[in-house]
Amino acid sequence: MTMKKENWRILTNKEIYASVKKPTIIETITLNRLFWFGHVQRMEGNRIPKRVLYMNLGTTRLRGRPQNRWQDEVREDGRIVGGEGWQEKVHNRDKWKKLLRMARNCCILHMRME
């Protein structure tokens, strides 16, 4: 009886994610950030989460390269997922959810990783 030697190799993260067809943790965080942003945008103006989102603390930023703020990340993610008019799509809940589901299923967010 002879045994065949199998070839083993280490798979890259991209190969693993492609084989399981699940979004990466970065994509999951991005989509959840956009879901939350849409939820807050549709709130009334006097609600605390919406007031905090647009609150200006009146402090100065530190010297050097400025770190991205939460709103900067949302703006970039929204542009990737929804194109130019993504901010108008937020106000229609059904269209927004459909757009984010399509982004999750079609791997639109992979553009950022590559």
Image: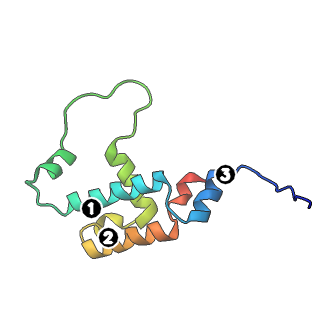
Q: What is the C-alpha distance between the residues marked 3 and 2?
A: 33 Å
Circles 1 and 2 in contact, beta carbons < 8 Å: yes
Q: Amino acid at mark 3?
A: Thr
Q: Amino acid at mark 1?
A: Gly
Q: Could you say which quadrant of the image residue 46 lies in?
A: bottom left
Q: How is the image coloured?
A: rainbow
Q: Quadrant of the N terminus?
A: bottom right
Q: Amino acid at mark 2?
A: Trp
Characterize the local packing of mark 3: few (<14), some (14-19) or many (20 or more) Cα atoms within 10 angstroms: few
Q: Disc 2 designates what residue? A: 96
* Above or below, comparing residue 58 to residue 40 in the picture: above
Residue 38: image tag: 1
Secondary structure under the numbered disc 2 in the rendered image: helix
Observer-nearest of 87 and 7: 7
Q: Could you say which quadrant of the image residue 45 lies in?
A: bottom left
Farthest residue in the top direction?
Answer: 63
Earlier along the polypeptide chain: callout 3 or callout 2?
A: 3
Q: Which residue is located at x 55 percent, y 66 percent?
A: 21
Q: Along the horizontal axis of the image, is 91 left or right of 100?
A: left
Q: Disc 3 designates what residue? A: 12
